Amino acid sequence: MSYDNETLEAVFAKTTGTCRYCGKQLSFSNYGAQGRRGAWVVDHANPVSRGGTDYLRNLWPACITCNLEKGDRPAQSYLRSTESRPAATGDCLVATAAFGTPWAPEIESLRWFRDHVLVGRRVGMAAVSLYYATSPEPARWITNHSGLAVIIRAPLRVISRVVRKMIGDSDATFPNKFIAPGTLRGR
Ligand SMILES: [Zn+2]
């Protein structure tokens, strides 16, 4: 399905340009441009395969990861499935607190590391669960003690640099462009 510019603008405006499901900031000009920063697609809240329409009320902006992961499910059931899953909050809490924004390039690569390397390996999975079980408290702490944020940023930067080297990229806008289509959270 292709949409005219007017429709795309209207869909994009529904969330003021963020993914309906994970809240990630999208880039209007990267519509359909998988691998680009802020790439997005038009998501049918009620999938076409289930009788969903192309009316504006059924169309939402979504990042490609969420759109693929949602698959054939209606929006509500996808949203419910992500609620119980800690990684779906999308943010590395400690890192976010340390950098003051969830969109620092360092955090993008940490997030990538979590989603593509840690998750899916048993030890990594345990570490991720432990992290999410314990991190809201430290994150609040860091937010309230700005001096701490500065200290914590250094090791996080090192990790993120290692991650980027691992995946062979020096460009801060990475990490999606090396992921082959179809491998995005294809579980
Ligand atoms: Zn998303």
Image: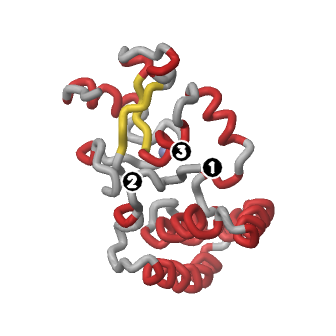
Question: Is residue 130 something one can see in this rendering?
Answer: yes
- Secondary structure, mark 1, is helix
Q: Position of residue 162 (x, y in %)?
A: 50, 84
Question: Is residue 138 something one can see in this rendering?
Answer: no
Q: CA distance from mark 2 to mark 3?
A: 20 Å
Image quadrant assignment for residue 37: bottom left
Position of residue 25 in the picture relative to residue 113 (left or right): left
Q: CA distance from mark 2 to mark 1?
A: 21 Å
Image quadrant assignment for residue 96: bottom right
Q: Are marks 2 and 1 in contact (CB under 8 Å)?
A: no
The residue where tag 2 is placed is 181
Q: Position of residue 21 (x, y in %)?
A: 53, 39
Q: Position of residue 18 (x, y in %)?
A: 43, 42
Q: Are marks 2 and 3 in contact (CB under 8 Å)?
A: no
Indicate whether 48 appears above or below 138: above
Position of residue 109 in the picture relative to residue 32 (left or right): right
Q: Tell me if the residue at label 2 has its CB under 8 Å from ligand 1.
A: no
Please identify the residue farthest to the left as the structure is shown: 5
- Secondary structure, mark 2, is loop
Indicate whether 48 appears above or below 176: above
Sequence-wise, which precedes: disc 2 or disc 1? 1
Q: Amino acid at mark 2?
A: Pro
Q: Residue at x 54, y 43 (%)?
A: 69
The residue where tag 3 is placed is 22
Sequence-wise, which precedes: disc 1 or disc 3? 3
The residue where tag 1 is placed is 88
Position of residue 127 in the picture relative to residue 187 (left or right): right
Q: Tell me if the residue at label 3 has its CB under 8 Å from ligand 1.
A: yes
